Image (cartoon, grey):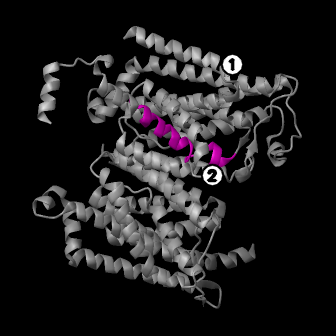
């Protein structure tokens, strides 16, 4: 018991740090989801599978003998084209339709991608070793893998870069205009079809970055995509569309929550607690809104 | 019109009654087809008639399955030792124990999901649109993950359902028994829903689908009907779950009981394939899907789920109205729609 009381503050620091660093990656994925949700009004269930696919690209590089950290450059480029292709094949047919159609269609893509990854990369849990070493804090009581710090930094850099790109570049402005009013944007000469394709591609590229970072900090497995989708969905509904500091904060909050539930309930309940939290948040918001006779829609 | 329907019902009934003797090798497959029909029919209560696209009806399927098996075992033996002993059959049900347990288990497998649906319905059904869809998706998966952490029902390893008691017939008799049980359950589901859709219940569900706010403004307690509709689905899905648990004989949390990637998607796909919002659509959709699945699955050998993913995308994008919707467009007279010749010609000109 003494040991536990002595250890609890250390464990809390450890869990909070782990969670916050992991949460930055969640926020990155959630930013991609918010982007396509805001612009195209599509909820992409295959978001998590894109993340895992991006991770496998980095893992393949690792197997081929290239340091997996270069994956953060290679995998977004490949993922951009995969996302663009996916848009041209499937998504452009569901953009203007009922939301449920797009949810179900992307669910189909998600199952498809899972299985293809299972065939190509096998059903084992894999991790790409980065050999970055670890940092010890507070008299060696808190261990922090450098890979996690590295991935958080890269995540922040990409997020800032994307925000600047959306603010300054021509395509970024076109994307923002389309998300505000697609018809008006079309009238003013913006090729919305191209904007949609680019948005989906950028989202896929973000997933690629996040996946490559996850491959060196975390583990990869063909069937763990859906939790990432649910996490990013949760972050988006907590923070709201287009609220960037909110996305970052709630992403880190979610990461911390997960690490704590890991310590308290045990690892076998980790995924379960994420999904349970999703249900609880949605129901909570529903009751909050119903007081004002409103509802989530 | 009326006679056509009568022929259809008669054909279904005769096929259902004779199938185990005509195709004895496919008894189990046809039983699973009836199960899929039940799932598609009950999904359509929410997805088609009420316009609430749920991914979470699999929750009741899994609950029913676990409740049924636990009751069957727990009535006569300590549940904990049963699951701890795993596949080894240290306990054996006598025939009377087995059938008593099965009937009690199936009754509870219907009742408990109904209670669950009533309890969570008020919270969940207040969500709309895609929030509802994602929330129910989370619900189904959360249930599977949590069930995988509960020791007494076998946690991640799963548990076995009681084996068929010795001394009563052979395995042929067992599959015939379960065949008729599933067939009767399917008939009960179909007849009940047909009856309910012709009542105020069906009208209110359709009103909710068309415009919920307006329905509420007209003085309908929409929430009550939404919960009631979910309870109806939960009842039949729960019994179907209990039956599947016994037919398969082995219950695993994420692959069999709360199987979002198989039964959970199948029920949506079948209802859409057949045509959602119609009574016959889910039945036809489930049959076509099951025949396709059993017939072609073996050709894909290992690639089934890839094929499933492609199938979902293709059906959703190119065939969202389903078979019934297609038939309705082809033969509108048969569906009681009056077609004006001049109107039809005008439409062609407009194109």
To which residue does mark 2 refer?
Answer: B146
Q: Quadrant of residue A44 in the image? A: bottom left
Q: CA distance from mark 1 to mark 2?
A: 42 Å
At x 72%, y 36%, the residue is B69
- Which element carries disc 1, helix, strand or loop? helix
Q: Is residue A179 visible?
A: no
Q: Residue furthest front?
A: B299
Above or below: residue B89 compared with residue B94: below
| Marks 1,2: beta carbons within 8 A | no
Q: Is residue A172 left or right of residue A113?
A: left
Please state, as top left, top right, bottom left or bottom right, where the C terminus of chain B lies in the image: top left
Of residues A237 and B46, the one drawn nearer to the viewer in this rendering: B46
Of residues B241 and B329, the one drawn nearer to the viewer in this rendering: B329
Q: Residue B254 in magenta?
A: yes
At x 51%, y 67%, the residue is A52
Q: Residues within 10 Å of mark 2 (few under 14, many from 20)?
A: many
Above or below: residue B158 compared with residue A45: above
Q: Is residue A289 left or right of residue B87?
A: left
Q: Is residue B149 left or right of residue B341?
A: right
Q: Earlier in the sequence, mark 1 or mark 2?
A: 1
Please state, as top left, top right, bottom left or bottom right, where the N terminus of chain B lies in the image: top left
Q: Chain of mark 2?
A: B
Q: Residue B244 in magenta?
A: no
| Residue A234 in picture, x, y percent from top left | 43, 59
Front tag of 1 and 2? 1
Q: Which residues are magenta?
A: B252-277
In the picture, the disc for residue A208 is none
In the picture, the disc for residue B21 is 1
- Which element carries disc 2, helix, strand or loop? helix
């Amino acid at each position: 018991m003494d040991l536990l009381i002595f250890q609890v503050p250390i464990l809390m620091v450890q869990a909070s740090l782990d969670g916050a660093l992991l949460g930055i990656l969640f926020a990155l994925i959630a930013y991609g989801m918010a982007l396509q949700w805001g612009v195209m009004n599509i909820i992409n269930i295959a978001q998590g599978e894109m993340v895992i696919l991006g991770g496998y690209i980095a893992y393949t590089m690792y197997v081929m003998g290239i340091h997996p950290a270069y994956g953060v450059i290679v995998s977004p480029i490949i993922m951009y084209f995969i996302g663009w292709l996916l848009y041209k094949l499937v998504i452009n047919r569901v953009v203007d339709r009922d939301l449920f159609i797009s949810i179900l269609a992307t669910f189909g893509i998600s199952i498809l991608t899972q299985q293809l990854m299972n065939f190509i990369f096998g059903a084992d849990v894999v991790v790409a070793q980065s050999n970055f070493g670890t940092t010890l804090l507070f008299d060696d009581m808190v261990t922090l893998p450098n890979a996690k710090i590295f991935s958080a930094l890269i995540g922040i850099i990409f997020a800032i870069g994307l925000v600047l790109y959306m603010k300054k570049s021509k395509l970024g402005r076109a994307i923002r205009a389309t998300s505000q009013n697609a018809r008006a944007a079309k009238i003013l000469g913006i090729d919305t079809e191209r904007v949609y394709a680019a948005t989906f591609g950028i989202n896929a590229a973000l997933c690629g970055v996040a996946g490559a970072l996850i491959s060196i900090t975390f583990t990869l497995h063909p069937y763990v995509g859906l939790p990432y989708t649910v996490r990013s969905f949760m972050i988006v509904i907590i923070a709201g569309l287009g609220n960037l500091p909110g996305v970052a904060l709630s992403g880190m909050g979610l990461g911390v929550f997960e690490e704590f539930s890991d310590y308290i309930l045990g690892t076998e309940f980790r995924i379960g607690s994420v999904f349970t939290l999703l249900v609880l948040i949605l129901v909570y918001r529903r009751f909050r809104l119903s007081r004002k006779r409103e509802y989530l829609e | 019109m009326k006679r056509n329907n009568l022929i259809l019902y008669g054909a279904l009934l005769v096929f259902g009654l004779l199938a185990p003797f005509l195709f004895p090798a496919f008894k189990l497959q046809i039983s699973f087809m009836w199960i899929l029909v039940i799932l598609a029919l009950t999904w359509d209560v929410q997805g088609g008639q009420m316009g609430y696209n749920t991914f979470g009806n699999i929750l009741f399927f899994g609950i029913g399955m676990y409740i049924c098996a636990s009751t069957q075992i727990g009535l006569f033996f300590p549940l904990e030792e049963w699951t701890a002993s795993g596949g080894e059959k240290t306990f054996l049900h006598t025939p009377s124990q087995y059938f008593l347990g099965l009937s009690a288990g199936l009754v509870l497998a219907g009742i408990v999901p109904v209670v669950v649906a009533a309890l969570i319905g008020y919270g969940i059904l207040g969500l709309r649109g895609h929030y509802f869809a994602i929330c129910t998706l989370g619900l189904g998966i959360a249930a599977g993950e949590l069930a995988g952490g509960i020791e007494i029902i076998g946690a991640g390893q799963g548990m076995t359902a009681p084996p068929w008691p010795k001394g009563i017939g052979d395995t042929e008799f067992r599959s015939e028994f379960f065949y008729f049980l599933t067939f009767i359950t399917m008939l009960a589901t179909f007849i009940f829903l047909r009856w309910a859709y012709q009542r105020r219940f069906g009208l209110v569900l359709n009103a909710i689908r068309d415009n919920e706010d307006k329905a509420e403004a007209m003085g309908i307690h929409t929430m009550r009907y939404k919960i009631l509709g979910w309870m109806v689905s939960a009842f039949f899905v729960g019994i179907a779950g209990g039956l599947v648990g016994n037919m398969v004989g082995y219950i695993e949390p994420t692959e069999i009981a709360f199987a979002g990637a198989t039964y959970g998607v199948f029920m949506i796909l079948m209802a859409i394939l057949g045509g959602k919002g119609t009574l016959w659509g889910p039945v036809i959709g489930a049959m076509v899907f099951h025949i396709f699945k059993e017939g072609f699955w073996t050709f894909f050998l290992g690639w089934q789920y890839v094929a499933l993913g492609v199938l979902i995308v293709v059906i959703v994008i190119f065939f969202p109205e389903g078979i019934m919707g297609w038939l309705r467009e082809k033969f509108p007279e048969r569906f009681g729609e009056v077609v004006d010749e001049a109107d039809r010609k005008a439409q062609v000109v407009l194109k």
